[in-house]
Image: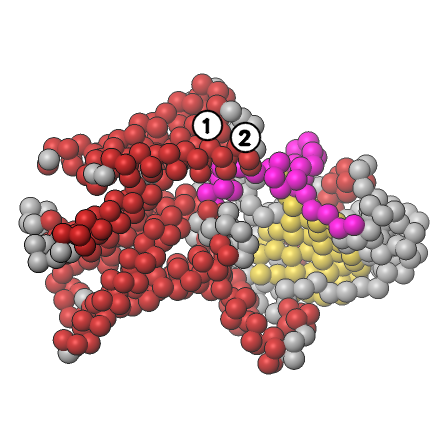
Amino acid sequence: MKNRTYNILFHTHTVSGIVISVVLYIIFFAGSFSFFRDEIVNWERNHVVEVTDDINVNIDQVLDSLAKNHDLYGRDIELRKYYVEQQIGVSLGASHDSLASEEAKTPSFFYLNTTNYKESSYDDSYTLGEFMYRLHFLTQIAYPVGYYLSGFVALFFLFAILTGVMVHWNKIVSNFYVFRPRAKLKTLWTDAHTTLGMLGLPFQFIYAVTGAFFMIKLLLVAPNILVLFNGDEAKFYDDLEYSHPHFEFKNNPIKTDVSLAKYIDEAKNMWNGFDVSEAHIFNYGDENMHISISGHLGYDNKFNGVGAVIFKPITKEIIFEKNPETKSTYLDAVKNILYRIHYGDYGGSTLKIISLILGFITCFVIISGVMIWLVARDKKNVPEKKRRFNKKVVNIYLAICLSMYPITALSFIAVKVFEPADKAFIYSFYFIGWLLIALFFIIKKNNDFTNKYTLLFGSIFGFLVPIANGVITGNWIWVSFLQNYYQIFTVDLLWILISILGLFVFFKVSKKE
C-alpha cells in the first residue's frame, strides 16, 4: 500500500472513530445488557417464566377477559408475544360495526398479564430491562432523531472497521500476537486496541451492518416506494408480507360460541416443534371471522423456519398455509435472519454470554482507540493550547462513557428498593445520576482517577445488586439456584461476575501504579 493511501485510510479511520466514540460506547454498553433484556425484566418483576417463544396461553380465556372491559364485536384483535415474559401485547383495531360505540371505534394497544389477566399500558409496564434495550438504539431521544443517529453511528462504525482492517492488513496476523504491557503508553494502548479489535471483528462487523440496516432502512426503502411502487406504500408493505390480509365484515353475528383455542392447538400439531408467537383475529364475532396464527420452528430444528396458517372458524377450513418446514424464501431470509443474528437469541444462554463479553470487549476497543488518539497528540511538538484541549475532550469522553458502569449498577439496586419503579422514575434516576457522576469526574480532570474509581464503585454497586434482590424479595442467589428461578439467578450471577472482573482490573491498575 502506498504511503499516501495508508495515511488517508489511517486518518479517516481515526477521525470516524473519534467522532462516534461516545455514542458508539453507549450503544455497545447498553446493547451488551440488552442480550439479557428478558432476564432483567423478569428479575425486576420477580417473575419465573418458561423460556420459550410460544404464546402459551388459552386464547378463549384471554378473549373472555378482554370482553369484560371492551366491546370486541367486529374488531381485529392481535395477541402477540414480543418477549419471554408473563405479558403479551394486545392490539384492538377499530370496530367495523357502524353501530359500535365511539370507544369501540378507537384502536388501542396494551399489555395483558397471562397469569391474572391484568391490563397495563406501555408506560405502566416499563422496566429497566426495556430501558437498557431502548437505550442501545437511542430511542430516548425524540423520534426519529435517536433512530437515525444510532443508524448513522452504526454506518460510520462499519466504515471505521473496514478502514481499520485495511490499515492493519499487512501486519494483521503478526500484530495479533503482539502485546507489550511494559512498553510505553501509546504502544500498550495500540497493542490492546489491535488485538481485541481483531478478536471482536466478526461480532463488530455483524452489529455494524445489522444496526445500520434496522435504524436507517426507512431512508433506504423510501426511494424504492417512490420509484418501484409509484408511491403506493400499502402495496410495498403487502409485497414484503408486513401487512395483514383483509377480510370483509359481513355484519352478521355468529349465533353460537366458537372456541378459537383449538385452532392454536391445531397449528402446533401441523408442524412438530412449532412455537406460536402471534394470533390475529379478523372481524371478531362475525360470520366472516378469520384467525391467523403465525410463529416459527424451534431454532434447534430450523434456524429460519417461519410459518403461518389462516382458519375460517365458521367453515373450519384452512384458507392459507405457509409451511415452515419447506425451504425458506429469499424474503424470509432477509427479514428474519438479520433480526436473529442481531438479537443473538437463537443459541440460548451460551450465545448471550459470548455476545455480552464481545460487547464489553468492543467498549474497551473504543476507549483504547480514544486513548491512542490522545497519547499520539500529547507530544512536545504539539502546541500547549492544543494539548490541553485534547486532554479536556478525552476527559469528558471518558467521564461520560465510564460513568455508565456505576449508574447502571445503581439503577438495578434502585428498581428493587423503590419497586414498583415506573418509567418516569427510571428515566430520572438513570439520566440524572449519570449526569452527576459524569460531572464529578469531569471536574476532577484526571483520566486515571476516572478509570480506576468508575471500576471500583461500579463493582461495589454490582455486588450489592444480588444483595438488594435478596433483602427485598427473599430470592437470594442460592435460593434462586435451588428453586430453578433461571431468570432471577442469571441476573444476580451476571452482576457478581462483572463485579469480580471490575475489581480484578481495578487492583491490577492500582498495583501497576
Which of 260/72 is in front? 72
The disc label shown at residue 421, or none? 2
Q: Quadrant of the C terminus?
A: top left
> Is 226 left, or right, of 502 in this rendering?
right
For marks 1 and 2, give the CA distance: 8 Å
Q: Amino acid at mark 2?
A: Ala
Residue that appears at 42% across and 23% down: 468
Q: Position of residue 502 (x, y in %)?
A: 26, 35
Q: Are marks 1 and 2 in contact (CB under 8 Å)?
A: yes
> Is 88 left, or right, of 68 in this rendering?
left
Residue that appears at 6% across and 46% down: 182
Which of 382/436 is in front? 382
Count residues near mark 1 (Cα–Cα under 10 Å), then give few for <14, some for 14-19, many for 20+.
Answer: some
> Is 509 left, or right, of 454 in this rendering?
left
Q: Position of residue 452 (x, y in %)?
A: 22, 35
> Is 97 left, or right, of 181 in this rendering?
right
Among all residues in the image, which is located at the extreme front?
A: 385
Q: Quadrant of the N terminus?
A: bottom left
Q: Which residues are magenta?
A: 106-133
Residue that appears at 40% across and 30% down: 410
Count residues near mark 2 (Cα–Cα under 10 Å), then give few for <14, some for 14-19, many for 20+.
Answer: some
Earlier-in-chain disc, 1 versus 2: 1
Q: Secondary structure at mark 2?
A: loop
Q: Secondary structure at mark 1?
A: helix
Queried whether the magenta region covers residue 123, the answer comes back as: yes
Residue that appears at 26% across and 65% down: 13
Queried whether the magenta region covers residue 72, the answer comes back as: no
Residue with the mark numbered 1: 414
Q: Does the rendering let one see residue 180?
A: yes
Tell me where residue 327 sits by quadrant: bottom right
